[in-house]
């Protein structure tokens, strides 16, 4: 009596699995930094867009009334609310009005989000800025702040104002 032949099952060897895992790891190492940079750039672009929208309304108010508004009116915007700041989507305390900054202050002294504001506004000169998440160093925080408040949305370079 002859025995029926059993088909041999093939499987991946340990070496083949290690090679596939190594290739996937290399691909992930190449793609992850690009994804993180794209994510950071999109946050900065969204913040810059919000700053431009609010700054435009401030300038319109100034053109009509001959002075800068004491506060930012959410009714100026669609949905009766301020544009969001992607660095603080909850916006528990949306705007820190800093009227002690003086007419020459175009940027806040502290550039990261605290409990007293997601945005910074100087009513003496009409400057409006988005505050950002605190980074690991002050230099990194300043770089993110500059990107988020750039009026050059294509190049993300620091403006001279």
Image (cartoon, helix red, strand yellow):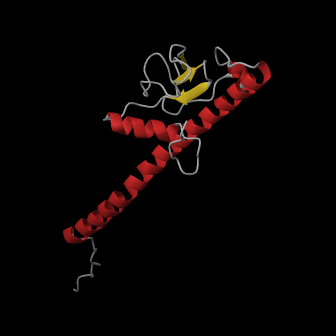
Residue positioned 35% across, 58% down in the render: 28
- Residue at the extreme right of the image, as rendered: 64
Q: Nearer the viewer, residue 84 or 108?
A: 108
Residue positioned 79% across, 22% down in the render: 64
Left or right, residue 137 beside residue 76? left
- Residue at the extreme front of the image, as rendered: 104
Left or right, residue 137 beside residue 107? left
Q: Position of residue 117 (x, y in %)?
A: 49, 19
Q: Is residue 74 above or below residue 49?
A: above
Q: Position of residue 44 (x, y in %)?
A: 51, 41
Q: Position of residue 11 (x, y in %)?
A: 27, 71
Q: Nearer the viewer, residue 85 or 35?
A: 85
Q: Position of residue 128 (x, y in %)?
A: 58, 27
Snapshot quadrant of residue 84: top right
Q: Is residue 4 above or below residue 75?
A: below
Snapshot quadrant of residue 24: bottom left
Point out the image quarter for the N terminus: bottom left
Residue positioned 26% across, 64% down in the render: 22
Left or right, residue 47 beside residue 68? left
Q: Is residue 129 above or below residue 140?
A: above
Q: Is residue 54 above or below residue 45?
A: above
Snapshot quadrant of residue 14: bottom left
């Amino acid at each position: 009596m002859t025995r029926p032949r059993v088909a041999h099952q093939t499987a991946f060897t340990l070496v083949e699995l290690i090679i596939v895992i190594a290739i996937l790891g290399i691909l992930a190492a190449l793609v992850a930094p690009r994804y993180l940079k794209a994510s950071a750039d999109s946050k900065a672009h969204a913040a810059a867009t919000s700053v431009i929208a609010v700054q435009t309304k401030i300038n319109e108010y100034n053109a009509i009334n001959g002075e800068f508004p004491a506060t930012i009116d959410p009714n100026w915007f669609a949905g009766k609310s301020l544009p969001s700041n992607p660095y603080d989507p909850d916006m528990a305390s949306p705007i820190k009005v800093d009227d002690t900054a003086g007419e020459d202050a175009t940027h806040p002294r502290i550039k990261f989000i605290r409990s007293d504001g997601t945005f910074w506004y100087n009513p003496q000169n009409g400057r409006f800025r988005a505050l950002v998440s605190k980074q690991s160093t002050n230099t990194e925080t300043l770089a993110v702040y500059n990107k988020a408040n750039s009026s050059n949305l294509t190049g993300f370079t620091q403006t001279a104002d």
